[in-house]
Amino acid sequence: MSFVEYGDTIKDGDTAIVFLGHESMFPVKVQHGTVTQTKYGVIRHSTDLIGKKYGSKVTCSKGGWIFILHPTPELWTMNLPHRTQILYSTDISIITMMLELKPGSIVCESGTGSGSLSHALIRTVAPTGHLYTVEFHQQRAEKAREEFKEHGVEHLVTVTNQDVCKNGFGVSNVADAVFLDIPSPWEAIGHAKSALKAEGGRICSFSPCIEQVQRTCLAMEEYGFTEINTLEILLRVYNFSHTCAGCTCSLDPSVTVGKHQHTPLPDSSSRCAPCPSSWCGDCLGHYATLKANRDDSGTLGYVMVRRWFFLGSVPEIRVLVHAHSLESTSVLH
């Protein structure tokens, strides 16, 4: 099993994701003879997991069921053990784009932390690129090495335990891009420039406070970086709803029911019925309700009630991701 080389079958020693629902999942290391407890009952690794295909639906001992998923950097971000505050997929996608990463890129990162961004960077630069990641805390660095080995990506990453602000990244003139997520990124700008290739490269710094941003941008200017940009990363959810805008009625005996037959009105005197909760593509913009009706002479006709609606959206007050600023820049030597 590898986070960058996907396999079909669950094997002994793999790290898998137990998926109970979108809001409930957790990682498990598959081991012969081991059992895992869930709210739906016991999962026996030997009989329920090993040899099965990833994505399989597994029935637990109490009759409930779960899915077993192949790990990805995104799933790992949602389920990893937190040793530090981590970056989430919204931040990671912007960082990867701003660093202009691709397969074969050489990247320097500090600090490693819980490894959320590291796994995404490794997948992006695989199979021929490499990640040099620096972590100040010794225990976190050792744990990161263990996880990279378990996840089958140790050949794509080098973990160094040192202070990047004093000792740099341990490499010179090899990196296409550098990423900084440390308290004092301005103190590491000189080492970041030394790590970049002679023809230049990209550098991004991720900071929660505007004072950090200001000092980092000044340091970038001092070391000759150009095209300095600052972004604020926010994620806001919008709630969409259908709103009825009124209706018009007509009597037309020649009208026939088309392929979309909507629910009739509850009675002949009702001019507005609740709008349906789902819509087909042919009905977008309006829909018609047909109701059989006899007049005083006994002639059968159809009352067609055409109801117009529009889509409205309102942003939620809460913001799902804490605000951070991302400074990106490039340098040409």
Image (spheres, grey):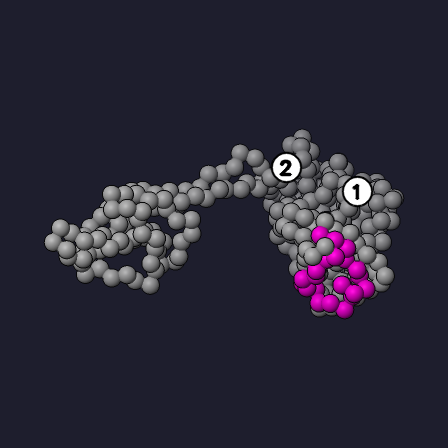
Q: Confirm whether residue 219 shows in the render.
A: yes
- Secondary structure under badge 2? loop
**What segment carries the magenta color?**
40-61
What whole-number distance in Å separates the C-alpha atoms at marks 1 and 2? 18 Å
- Classify residue 243 as left or right of residue 327: left
Q: Residue at x 37, y 42 (%)?
A: 243
Q: From the viewer's side, name the closer residue of 194 and 214.
A: 214
Q: Residue at x 88, y 44 (%)?
A: 138
Sort mark 2 into few (<14), some (14-19) or many (20+) by Cα contacts within 10 Å: few
Q: Quadrant of residue 261?
A: bottom left
Sequence-earlier tag: 1 or 2: 1
Which numbered circle lies on residue 323?
A: none
Task: Find disc 1 in the rendering and name its residue.
Answer: 83
- Classify residue 91 as left or right of residue 115: left
Q: Quadrant of residue 128?
A: bottom right
Instruction: Residue 52: say if magenta.
Output: yes
The amino acid type found where label 1 is placed reads Arg
